[in-house]
Amino acid sequence: MTSLLDKLVLLWPEIAMLIGACVCLVTGLSGSQTLRKATPGFAMLALVAAAALLRFVNPHHDAGYGSGVDPHHFMQLGGMVGFAKLAVLAIGLILIMVATGTPDALKQIIAADSAEGKAFEPGDCYRGEFYAFMLFSLTGVMLCAGASDLVWLFLALELTSLPTYVMAATSRDKPAAQEAAVKYFFLGAMSAAVFLFGFALIYGATGFTEFGPIADHVQTVGVSPLMMMGVVLAVVGICFKIAAVPMHFYTADVYEGAATPVTAFLAFVPKAAGFVSLIGILGLVGWGHSNGGTATELPAALVYLIALIAVVTMTVGNVLGLMQQRIKRVLAYSSIAHSGYMLVGLLVGPVAAQAVSQTEDTLLSNGLAAVLFYLVAYGLSTVSSFAVIACISKPDGTEVETYDDLAGIRLRHPFLAAVLLVSVISLVGLPPLVGFLGKLYLIGSAYSAASIGSATAWVYPTIVVIMVLNSAISAGYYLRIASVAFFGEDKQQTVQLKLPVRMWGATIAAVAALLLGGLPGNLLVESSRKAAEPKRAVTPPTRTVPDNPAPTEPKLRPDRVTDSVDALR
Amino acid sequence: MQLPEHLTIPFQLILPALFAMGLLLPFKFLNTRKGAWIYSATTSTISFGFSLYVAYHFNWADPGKLSYVGTIPWIPGFGLEFSYGLDSMSLWLVLLTTFLMPIVVLGSLVEVKGDMRTFHFWLHILEAALIGTFIARDIIFFYVCFEFTLIPLFFLIGIFGHGEKLKAAKVFFYYTFTASLLTMAGMLYVAWFNTTLDPAMPELIAAYETIDLDVPDDYTGTATQYAQETYAGHWTFNIKALWAAGRVMPLHMQILVMLSLLAGFGAKTPLFPFHTWLPLAHTEAPTAGSVDLAGLVLKLGPYGLLRLAIPMLPLAVLAIAPYLGALAVFGVVYAALVCWVQRDAKKLIAYSSVSHMGFCVLGLFAFDEGNIGATGAMVYMISHGLATGGLFLCIGMLYDRFHTREIERMSGLAKIMPLWAFFFCVFIFASVGLPGLNGFVGEFLTMLGTFNSQEVHGKPILGPWYAIIAGTGVILAAIYLLYLVGKIVFGPVLLPHWEDTGETGIGGKHEHDLSYRETMTVAPLAVACLVIGLFPFPILRSLEPSVEAMNKAVNAQIEVENGEAVNEEAGVDGRIGMNAKPPRRQDAKEEAWWFEQQRSIDVHNSDGHNLQHRDAAVTLDDNHIALLGYMLEYLQMQEEDTQ
């Protein structure tokens, strides 16, 4: 095969997604109503096909491809790409299940569909676009994960975002949706300008747009002020995608304005894109380099910046979440808070894993693995909680909005209430659900980072305490959701929408959140570890009792204790 | 027939959970109130029966050692596993849990309005979570179960409670959840610290050697080698591994971890300033919830302190024990005074729990030589569960009849409900600490332990003053509890007016004596109170070795501190203080001798010229010869000691 085809192999999943999007556009306008209604089915098929290609054909999955194609070879983190793509595809599948029926509920489409006797008016029906845009956006995330060039990264980020603006606008008949979309679009455009400016400065400082040469350049000449400026601007700009302070202002309004299935989409997909991009950008200035350099922490200024963003983000999210009365706003602020938690893992990075021990026990100390793990945990829990809310409506057909509307759903819809309970408990981080493991992972990695022994070591234990206190604050509003659902009086007489697929989406996400907290969680732990493990580290030996039972001399690592103790002092 | 050892305990844990799942099955008879109730009463009795079986096969010859040890892998990559085992401390608390469950089920037929299935579902889940906490041998398993007790109680209080049930449920959840999150941060910190340890560190090896580690059967090396290979420097959450890691921490780190553990366990206990959630939760909870809260959930706090904090952080424990003792004593007296002015009988009992658990904490941090205080605290936990549980049940029965709990509105019940009055008085006397009933054993032992608290640097850790002030709490308890009895049980008959006789009504009256069901509910508790009061020794004897194992590190630390202390006092040559313990001062003469001897050292060191000590103004000639005489005497005594 030619080298072009070799490289194209990497993009097969994305190509499958694009083909799927085109199919959706066609079937959405088909003359046959059955085919039109089957559009989400085609979208799901495209996702399954992409996942299959990724898993069985694409070498990404094991990160076994040559360094020439590895987009993250400068950090030796190629494994992340496959993990992120697979995670996005899996949760994307649930998101499409949740989104089924959203366009069908729009007046315009109902009118177009039920035009008795008249010919079907393609111009009035944008069902196909809705699902196609979902696929485009998901493709954008996958491309972000695989980006190895600033320009590519920028385009991929925009591919993720642009469809979501349209989805937010067209998802509901209400003006609120259009208002949300306009806000989202303008602020999104501004943030794009900010990080594009950052990218430009990075290019100006180093003269390259590819990640590898930039990282090499940084390693040889150090981080220049211009470079630092560029990275800071890029990080702050991407904060918009992950809904972190200072770019979080749109979140509550947009999440509230869009239809709930779209909100679920917004709460996960742009965040995933943001975090994989941030990993790439931060990797340019820290965390070890292609030519075997030792792992380095991020520059102190960036450590402080990200720590500050993380602390403020989680605190703002939780405190404001506590004050909200509308469920979707509450969940919006909760998603802000969760971004704050994930930033802690990003702050730690893979360095601690290498510093703590060179050959073993990199688990529970690798911040990047924690971020990837938490992204999935958060995605499942938050999607299922939004999906439950999308499954019920007020008697007049409008969405449930306030706590009061949700009151007493236990009596009317016990099954949905149970699903909501599971997802909310997972979001709080109560054991034994997946959210608990995620928090454990983040806290463990943050503690490990304290043992690096640099000047910024004090940041990590401090941030753990702040994170724990924030979890406590968050329990306030999560608990309120659970308690109105279970203890409230059934005043609103909510009805359950007849959308079995959507309910199945919610159920699958909640069951996954439940199961991944138990033994099956090992799969996710292992794969996230593999994904974020720098490739030069030796795989950890299994910790079984050795076959040769002769007592062995314990391995001596004399300086470790004193080092870490000193670091804490 | 005997189950395989390692499966016994998981079975005990899973049994209630399975029974809870059984309530979700679509059987018609479970839809009726009686059906669900009968199902739940049967299943919880089966659980109790199984725990008796567990107790029967328990290794009573060596109750301090873990029996039924086993491990179920969870996330091996994180070092997470469900490992479990049972020593006498755990066993007695598991027995208490399974014993109280059928009783609360029996007692909650009438009171619970609404969905019986849900109620019994959460009750069974709570039982499983409690058992899990008591059998955990791994901090994450411990924490998982510890936290999971919140969810069933949240629903039990929130759905089935009275009055301000929503607020009570939220306050309870929020308060204890916040506190135990800090505990988790602390425990993870120790786990992380463990990963930074060098297996060859001498202090760590010394710590491993003093701990009775659990080594797999197929391992041939010594326990210490096993620990060095599998624990030191690895992510592990094994409780004993973390004891060792905690012991090698420097003091300031130990204190930080201790404070974080205290946040969670102190709020659960509840220790004085963290008790504010308790009265509301207890008062608004349904009777079953109150009994479980007071009888079982409160025990998680002292149990956690004894199982985790005390063996893990000896330095910090010694450093802050006096402050904790002061808080406990203050809590005892304060809560007792608050009890005195209550008008709501249930609230009075709730505050009395705060007061009584103060004794528990006092006993735990007494550190007398025979570990009497801590053993007493364990017994106190069990007897408090029985007596206070009984009181809550009695008050619940009143509420079923009269729909009020106000002390002012009823009196003279002994004439109308003699059987009820009898049981109520039994539980009241058990709470007051009447000899012959269970409350006395624990109260006496904790006070004795406090009184005999060991000395560090010549000062007792807690000492007589703590015991004396806490003793006023006992007197106050007698006052407020007997006042309650006097108001409600005796005096002229006064019944609150209440139209609806409800399901309790026998013959259309609400003022009837206990039904068979109600008698069956409280009688086992009363019998247990009496049995423990009269024959506490089986429990005490079996608890002693476990408690001793928990207190070992602190006791060793006390020895070390005292050794150092005497060395310092002995001055440059250190001739006198080579013994680890200072000579015990038995009488005034010896006291005087001790003082003189101290001074003599100063005098000798300064050699009569460089007199900077404040006692140096004493002229040498006056006492010199007498002092030398004492010195010789002392040296002779020392020689005798060593021989």
Image: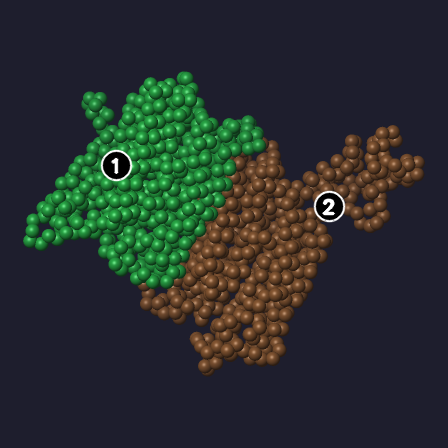
Chain colours: A green, B brown
Q: Are marks 1 and 2 on the same chain?
A: no
Neighbour tally class for label 1: few under 14, some 14-19, many 20 plus, Cα within 10 Å: some
Residue furthest top as drawn: A220
Q: Can residue A63 be seen in this view?
A: no
Residue at the (13%, 40%) spot, across then down: A26
User: Do we see residue A132 in this rendering?
Assistant: yes
Q: Disc 2 on helix, strand or loop?
A: strand
Q: Which amino acid does label 1 sit on?
A: Leu
Q: Position of residue A460 (x, y in %)?
A: 49, 35
Q: In which quarter of the image is the C terminus of chain B?
A: top right
Name above or below for residue B340 compared with residue B419.
above
Q: Which amino acid does label 2 sit on?
A: Lys
A228 left or right of A17? Answer: right
Q: Residue at x 69, y 39 (%)?
A: B560
Q: Residue at x 31, y 22 (%)?
A: A209
**Residue on which the image places disc 1:** A162
Label 2 is found on which chain of the structure? Answer: B
Q: Where is residue B229 in the image (x, y as percent from the top left)?
A: 51, 34
Q: Is B226 placed above or below A398 here? A: above
Dot 1 falls on which chain? A
Secondary structure of the residue carrying tag 1 is: helix
- Which residue bears the numbered disc 2? B459
Q: Which residue is at a point 61% across and 50% down the rendered structure image?
A: B547
Mark-to-mark CA distance, 1 and 2: 73 Å
Question: Disc 1 vs disc 2: Cβ atoms closer than 8 Å?
Answer: no
